[in-house]
Image: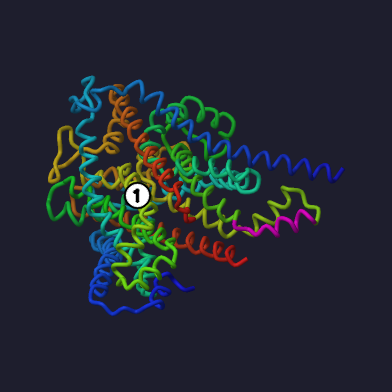
């Protein structure tokens, strides 16, 4: 793959001092980007030292969070982060993939582009806006209507028990679902559009219906990109702060019921960091940040690998 | 019979996918409708000109938060845009294979880091040494978020510039840096501008990294003091128990969303005039 720069170099090599200076300057600014990431890792590692030494690996499995006795454990937050993100995906995957199928296979190009622009606008909304709407409009609705209904119909399941507070894992998951499906739709649609036309024509010519063509031929062809879009949405959900902080209930405990109030890593940092008076408490919060950092880096890495794999396959056709 | 069943399943599933798309798009309109309905009831001139009233008192505005947001975002742009832009020029024009792909990878990585963690970084870098919260600390956090966005957008749009333009200017005897400054960058400027607009719109709506860097303030802030910003104000007003503060949160939400919409539509219009949209 010849890059723009490599080709331009081949055109002419002009040895000039101005070029050397420009190159050096650009190199320094590019190095700043690299330096910033190194700084994030370094500061998270350094800042969490006190907590890592005191609690060791037990930090991840302890569910005590007591600033008075200075005992800190990450389990309630880790649990809240993971459970809300996974429940959000249960909602946003079918919705997102379904919409992506419509946008790539059925809708005419003009309509598809217009609708995709609208969906992508959702991804551009600040998260505090989602929090505002969720806290002032969705929470009262959940408390008075949705949660009593769920308890009435599905109350025999352990997931839908206990009092209806309005705030809790379920409300946070719903908000995260709305915040993640724009990513799933946008990236899945791209990978579905990258499937070669011949694949569809061959399946239709063999007598498959439109849906059979889509589901048995086109979707499997684009599956890596779709998985990638899901991981991208997951990474986004794991790190989401404001909207979750406003509706999850902010209670550091582990509950099986989705109606119960919980806590997430990002929200405990948002709530307690400014008032973290003691060194150990600040260190414990930074260590939570470190855990969240590692989680999102891994999930993002997987997403990128999957998306690159499909787009390069698509362009080879 | 079998064929009829298959056709029925096909029609059913395809309409289900249409329904999914309908739900997804209607989410946008439901959100906008709620904001416009609740926000327009509460938005008045005082909102833009007055300071917040004391806790529990009715009335007042968010003039300080609007100015504070401008200060913090302006400072963040002043730091983040030049760094991001030049780093992007490097990736597109001075591609040293290994180092460039390393920078590209880390820029994507930085882009994927949750904003709250960027807040922790700015807290340790600025708030701890200075021993107090400040608008400057907030703008450092936002600049860190802005840099990778601008870098990747700049690179992407400069790569779109046709090779023939570069060859032409080099053939006329221009040096590399002159070619970049007078030919490549102007040719890609619309796209780069779009990227910058979208990046600034994105950081302007961020509140998580400001919570413990710029903090909040009921009065006018300054570069060196805790300063209110629109998103942080929305957060505190919304979770407060006062009806009148909820009203103000809706008004602020409407203002913020209007800014985001304007930026996105403007960016789209700049792009629509003769620049091809790179994918992804």
| Residue A132 appears in the figure | yes
Q: Which is more toward the observer, A284 or A162?
A: A284
Secondary structure under tag 1 reads helix
Q: Quadrant of residue A194?
A: bottom right
Q: Is residue A199 magenta?
A: yes
> At 44% across and 61% down in the image, what residue appears?
B160
> What residue does disc 1 label?
B199
> At 27% across and 36% down in the image, what residue appears?
B230
Does B126 sit left or right of B99 as displayed? left
- In this rendering, is residue A284 above or below B72? below
- Other-residue count near label 1 (Cα within 10 Å), few / some / many at <14 / 14–19 / ≥20: many
| Residue A60 appears in the figure | no
Q: Quadrant of residue A293?
A: bottom left
- In this rendering, is residue A37 above or below B116? below
The C terminus of chain A, quarter of image: bottom right
Q: Which is more toward the observer, A278 or A158?
A: A278
Q: Position of residue B68 (x, y in %)?
A: 21, 39
Does A154 sit left or right of B59 as displayed? right
Secondary structure of the magenta portion, mostly? helix
Q: Which is more toward the observer, A33 or A24?
A: A24
Render colour scheme: rainbow
Specify start and end residues of the magenta stretch as a single range: A194-205
Q: Position of residue A198 (x, y in %)?
A: 70, 59
- In this rendering, is residue B96 above or below A190? below
Q: Position of residue B138 (x, y in %)?
A: 22, 47
Q: Is residue B37 magenta?
A: no
Q: Across the whole image, how many numbered discs are drawn on residues? A: 1
Chain letter behind tag 1: B
In the displayed orientation, state which residue is furthest to the right. Answer: B1
> At 55% across and 28% down in the image, what residue appears?
A149
Q: Position of residue A33 (x, y in %)?
A: 30, 63
């Amino acid at each position: 793959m010849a890059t723009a720069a490599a080709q331009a170099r081949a055109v002419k090599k002009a040895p000039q001092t101005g070029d050397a200076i420009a190159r050096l300057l650009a190199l320094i600014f590019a190095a700043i980007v690299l330096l910033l990431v190194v700084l994030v890792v370094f500061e998270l590692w350094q800042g969490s030292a006190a907590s890592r030494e005191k609690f060791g690996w037990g930090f991840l499995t302890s569910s005590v969070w007591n600033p008075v006795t200075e005992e800190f454990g990450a389990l309630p937050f880790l649990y809240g982060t993971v459970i809300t993100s996974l429940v959000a995906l249960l909602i946003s995957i079918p919705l997102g993939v379904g919409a992506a199928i419509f946008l790539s296979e059925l809708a005419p190009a003009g309509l598809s582009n217009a609708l995709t622009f609208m969906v992508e606008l959702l991804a551009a909304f600040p998260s505090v806006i989602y929090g505002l709407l969720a806290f002032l409009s969705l929470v009262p609705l959940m408390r008075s209507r949705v949660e009593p209904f769920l308890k009435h119909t599905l109350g025999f399941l352990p997931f839908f028990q206990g009092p209806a507070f309005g705030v809790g894992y379920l409300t946070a998951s719903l908000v995260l679902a709305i915040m993640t499906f724009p990513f799933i739709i946008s990236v899945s649609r791209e990978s579905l559009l990258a499937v070669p036309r011949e694949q569809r024509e061959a399946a239709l010519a063999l007598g498959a219906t439109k849906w059979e063509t889509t589901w048995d031929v086109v979707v499997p062809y684009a599956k890596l990109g779709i998985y990638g879009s899901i991981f991208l949405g997951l990474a986004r959900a794991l790190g989401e702060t404001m909207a979750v902080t406003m509706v999850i209930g902010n209670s550091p405990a582990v509950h099986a019921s989705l109606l119960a109030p919980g806590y997430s890593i990002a929200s405990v940092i948002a709530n307690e960091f400014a008032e973290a008076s003691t060194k150990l408490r600040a260190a414990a919060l930074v260590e939570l940040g470190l855990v969240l950092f590692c989680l999102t880096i891994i999930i993002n890495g997987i997403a990128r690998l999957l998306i690159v794999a499909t787009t390069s396959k698509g362009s080879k056709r | 019979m079998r064929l009829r069943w298959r056709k029925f399943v096909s029609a059913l599933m395809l309409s289900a996918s249409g329904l999914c798309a309908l739900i997804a798009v209607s989410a946008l309109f439901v959100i906008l409708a709620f904001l416009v309905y609740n926000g327009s009831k509460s938005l008045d001139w005082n909102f833009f000109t007055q300071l917040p009233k004391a806790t529990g008192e009715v009335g007042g505005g968010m003039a300080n938060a609007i100015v504070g947001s401008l200060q913090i975002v302006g400072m963040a742009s002043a730091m983040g845009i030049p760094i991001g832009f030049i780093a992007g020029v490097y990736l597109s024009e001075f591609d040293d294979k290994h180092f460039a792909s390393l920078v590209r990878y880390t820029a994507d990585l930085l882009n994927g880091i949750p904003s709250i963690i960027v807040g922790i970084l700015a807290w340790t870098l600025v708030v701890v040494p200075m021993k107090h919260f400040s608008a400057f600390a907030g703008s450092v956090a936002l600049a860190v978020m802005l840099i990778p966005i601008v870098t990747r957008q700049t690179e992407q749009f400069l790569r779109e510039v046709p090779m023939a333009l570069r060859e032409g200017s080099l053939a006329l005897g221009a040096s590399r840096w002159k070619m970049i400054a007078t030919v490549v960058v102007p040719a890609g400027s619309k796209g780069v501008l779009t990227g910058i607009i979208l990046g600034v719109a994105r950081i302007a709506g961020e509140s998580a990294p400001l919570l413990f860097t710029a903090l909040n303030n009921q009065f006018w802030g300054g570069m060196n003091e805790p300063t209110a910003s629109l998103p942080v104000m929305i957060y505190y007003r919304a979770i407060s128990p006062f009806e009148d503060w909820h009203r103000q949160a809706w008004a602020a939400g409407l203002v913020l969303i209007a800014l985001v919409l304007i930026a996105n539509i403007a960016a789209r219009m700049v792009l629509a005039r003769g620049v091809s949209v790179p994918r992804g």
